[in-house]
Image: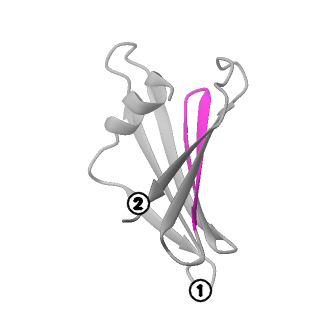
Amino acid sequence: MDGALVSAARRVSALACLVVAGACANETSTRTDTVDPQAGAREYVEARAKWDGANIVTEWSAANMKLTRTYASSADGKVLTVRVAPEEKKGGPPPRPPMTLVYDRE
């Protein structure tokens, strides 16, 4: 995972605005403005979560990086699969390849 994105996510202030879109609350979105303590520059961290069929998709976006996570549960509820896909934004570093995490319930 990109260190700059993790660092920006950690700096998100405790006060964030939550916007619920859609009649059935199928999507949420937050946008927080932060200041990078090293560069002294103001930046925005955006986070979204939405349903995509039976999956939950979260997107974190900051500076030149975007991180998408897709959470999928098996039909029997015993396996959770999380696909983590970094994406390059204009002028950002090349993204790392996506990875898949699999969690088994015992």
Residue at the right extreme, as displayed: 90
Compared to residue 46, the image places residue 77 above or below, namely below
Q: CA distance from mark 1 to mark 2?
A: 19 Å
Judge by depth and name the residue closer to the eye, 78 or 23: 78
Q: What x and y, as percent, mark residue 45?
A: 48, 41
Compared to residue 85, the image places residue 103 above or below, namely below
Q: What x and y, as percent, mark residue 99?
A: 60, 37
Lateral position of residue 5 relative to residue 7, left or right = right
At x 66%, y 20%, the residue is 92
Q: Contact, CB < 8 Å: mark 1 with mark 2?
A: no
Magenta part, dominant SS: strand
Viewer-side label of 1, 2? 1
At x 51%, y 64%, the residue is 79
Q: Amino acid at mark 2?
A: Cys
State the mark number for residue 24. Answer: 1
Compared to residue 81, the image places residue 37 above or below, namely above
Judge by depth and name the residue closer to the eye, 102 or 26: 102
First to last magenta residue range: 58-73
State the mark number for residue 17. Answer: 2
Residue at the bottom extreme, as displayed: 23
Q: What x and y, as percent, mark residue 66?
A: 61, 37
Lateral position of residue 56 relative to residue 12, left or right = right
